[in-house]
Image: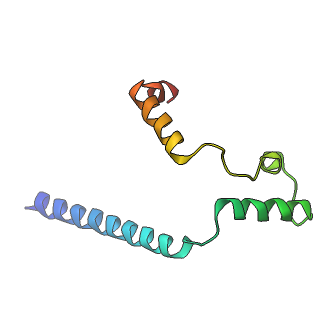
Amino acid sequence: MKKIAISLLLIGVAAAAFANESADERQNRATFSGERTRADVRAEYVNARRAGALANTSESASLETQSLKGSVRSRAEVRAEAVQAARDHVIDQLI
């Protein structure tokens, strides 16, 4: 009888933890969904850094040198390349 009670208690605790995690995910999606694009955020960051509003760090130095323009390849081209890499098992070798 004790084993059944303990098992039910553990199942209840686990269910509560998963429910809480799900609620957190929904709240994060609602809170952090924005309308700015990645390029907008990156441009704002680079401008703030150039203006001296941010400290210069070696980790973030590469962001300033990267191009802010979009890719010259289309989404379909990148997707086709990823599908082909998966078929050739190239992705498995990189992991």
**Horizontal and vertical percent for residue 90?**
47, 25
Residue shown at the point (77%, 48%) measured from the top left = 67
Asked whether 52 or 37 is in front, the reply is 37
Residue shown at the point (57%, 46%) measured from the top left = 74
- Image-based side of 49 in relation to 63, left or right: right
Q: Quadrant of residue 17?
A: bottom left
Q: Quadrant of residue 46?
A: bottom right
Residue shown at the point (52%, 27%) measured from the top left = 94
- Compared to residue 66, the image places residue 15 above or below, namely below
Asked whether 39 or 26 is in front, the reply is 39
| Observer able to see residue 76 | yes
- Compared to residue 7, the image places residue 72 above or below, namely above
Q: Residue placed farthest to the left in the image?
A: 1
Residue shown at the point (64%, 69%) measured from the top left = 36
Asked whether 32 or 71 is in front, the reply is 71
Asked whether 68 or 72 is in front, the reply is 72
**Horizontal and vertical percent for residue 27?**
46, 74
